Amino acid sequence: MTYQPHPKAPGSAAGIDEALIAELVDRFYAKVRRDALLGPVFNTRIDNWDEHLTKLRAFWSSVVLLTGRYKGQPMPVHAAIGEITDAHFERWLELFAETAKDVCPPQAAALFIDRSQRIAQSLRLGIAASRGVIA
């Protein structure tokens, strides 16, 4: 099945296509895997990086191109990782923004960074709620 970008997808207006998404995801997670803080969290949980990168490309395609390719549920997966803290989110956002600026044209980088911040905020709130930190 092929998934086309939605005609009103914000990524289309920013010049984002599947190739750019793949380059961003692949380069970003190469950094994550080597990172002193994030690497251990990911590397101990992901057995098949090719499969995981395919899933992450589908996720970002759904976020910025509104393709509907991603069918997962990231909240329960992240909430189940007890060691995730705000420091992990901050480092993830820092590396993601750095990579987006390196890989993407400015308008595309800005869109990816904006969406990453929104997603991180949503995950942070969901994790806090699941841990009983907020009602």
Image (cartoon, rainbow, N blue to C red):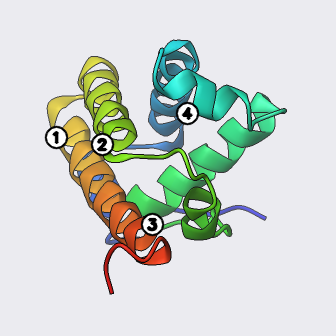
Residue underneath mark 3: 127
Q: Which residue is mark 4?
A: 22
Whichever of callouts 1 and 4 sits on the residue coming sooner in the sequence is: 4
Proximity of marks 1 and 2: CB atoms separated by less than 8 Å: yes
Q: Judge left or right: residue 54 versus residue 130.
A: right
The Cα–Cα distance between marks 4 and 2, rounded to whole angstroms, is 14 Å
Q: Are marks 1 and 3 in contact (CB under 8 Å)?
A: no
Q: Residues within 10 Å of mark 1 (few under 14, many from 20)?
A: some
Quadrant the C terminus occupies: bottom left
Q: Is residue 133 above or below residue 18?
A: below
From the image, tell me which residue sits under label 1: 107
Q: Quadrant of residue 29?
A: top right
- The numbered mark, 1 or 2, whose residue comes first in the sequence reads 2
- Element on which disc 2 rests: loop
Quarter residue 133 falls in: bottom left
Q: Distance between the Cα atoms at labels 3 and 2?
A: 33 Å
